[in-house]
Image (cartoon, rainbow, N blue to C red):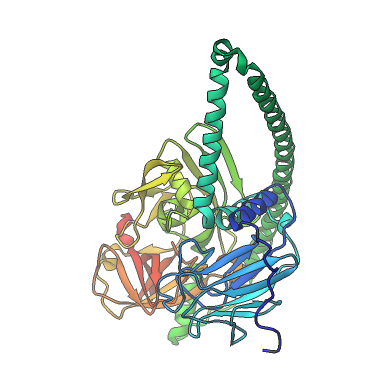
Amino acid sequence: MTKKQTLTTTGSKAQPNRATQAFATGLKILGGANVPIYTLQHLTNTDNHPAGSYEKIVVPYVELGRDKTCVIQFDDSCDTVSRKHAAIERQGKDIFIKNLSATNPTLINGRPVAEQWYLTNGDEIQLSLEGPKLLFNVSPTGTSKLGLTNRMNLVIKQAVKPYKNAFLSLLFLLIASIAVASYIISNQGRVIKKNKDTIAQQEVAIRGLKTANNTIVDSLTAAHKNNRRVREELSSTKDQMVAVKQSFEQKLRELRLKAAKLAENNNRTTTVVSNDNNTDIQQLLKQAEADVFFIYATSLDVTYPDGTTEEITSQNELWSGTGFLLNDGRFVTARHVIEPWYFFKDKDDPMMVLNTYTNNGGKVIANMVAVSATGKKIKFKNHDFKVDRSKDQPYTVNIADDEFVIKRGQLGNGTDWAVFQTNKQGVLETSASLSNSLKRGTELHALGFPFGLSLQNSAQLNPVYSKSEVGQNGLVNNSITITGRSFDIGNSGGPTFVIQDGQLLVVGIISAGRGVTGSVIPISAIQ
């Protein structure tokens, strides 16, 4: 490298405590300050981070590695990544990377870093010679452009999680200080009566408490002003949501017009029957796609255990999946699409908090919309569906030294399905008996919306086709095992078909996948 590999330090001047820096930055962000952002885009597909996903970094210091305290955390399958492999630090306008590992190298644009190295826009970071790669980019906008919910999630993940112990220590000192102050106040009357010599000292203490009280009043006044600003931002966010909704409804109207014109043109042309198998499949898929729906969550209505309520919204969909409409009017999807808080990954997953509310006196309602390629639209809530929670497992979580027992849904046991009866009618037919007795090697065809709207033309929804094979005879753990998996995140809840006697028959619901294998819920589960 032509630049100096080791950055100069600031002599013996002590650097600020990183936990304090993180908390201070988090408070600035929540207060509306414009803190710089840079992003790390994952170029390598791993279990924790799909290729193409990216992280927005707002705190001055983050660590990368397999340790649970790392902000950018990799799973144990990345065995060439050290527990604490590297760190990225921002000082003023400079951002540089540090190699923390004594055994595995950190590379910038293919060259190893001895100790530290300045980062520039577009640099490629690699953790070990065979490890995952990330792309470093500096964002032109700061945190003030982010919505409140997005800012809160970034602060919790990057400013609180890595320094949880430090945060708890500060909280303990604060509680202890409050207890001592309360003890002094409650006993000062008796102290004054018993010992007049200490009156002057008590008066000094009282003046100190008054000063502290004035400080608290000033802080509360500032907090009130900040809350008013937050309410104004929420009002602005709602206005933006209304504009997005109106734009989306306009696009749906345009889709309906195009579909009507297409149907009119089809009626004027002569249907050509082809003996080509691929042409036959295309015709069957074209008929089926009208009843395959893109599902997205628009907002959450949360009732907390103490009875207070809050609406959580976003400028984009909160999450998405796939569903389908049967010829008997039933709408089907995967259970983890309509109530994902039952399928949280670990204790750091925000969905676990919603699960805790749901199982301890609170309530979570997801408001959702389903749209098909032909413009059909269905609105619903998660509690409209019939689901199976009989195999949910108890899970214990500690929050602020209190222990809560919640329930956690399981994939791969045949219960990842959800269904409700609509007043609409589709064309998709099912075969429950066939779904229980599929043979190895049977081709399964699927339609869905992997990666949400990122693979869609904004003017015309078009479900993505994929094909897999049955991997084991019959059902295993009440599920269909598939191999050669070609579906991905966002296909969940979509239909899988077999072709029998020139007809598409629904035999399963896409549930989960790992590598080339996957799990499909048999359609017989909802009978």
Q: Is residue 527 left or right of residue 421?
A: left
The spot of residue 156 in percent (x, y) is 56, 52
Which residue is painted at 44% across and 87% down in the image? 275
Residues 33 and 95: in front is 95
Quadrant the C terminus occupies: bottom left
Front-lying residue, 382 or 305: 305
Residue drawn at point x = 49 percent, y = 64 percent: 292
Q: Is residue 289 above or below residue 81?
A: above
How many labels, in total? 0
Outermost front residue: 197
Residue 480 in percent (x, y) is at 30, 68
- Can see residue 152? yes
Image position of 428 (left or right of 235): left
In the displayed structure, would residue 180 be above or below residue 360? above
Q: Residue at (25%, 63%) from the top-left corner?
A: 477
Instruction: Give the quarter of the figure containing the N terminus.
Output: bottom right
User: Residue 144's quadrant in the figure?
Assistant: bottom right
Q: Is residue 458 visible?
A: no
x then y, percent, for residue 431: 32, 65
Residue 40 position (above or below residue 320): below
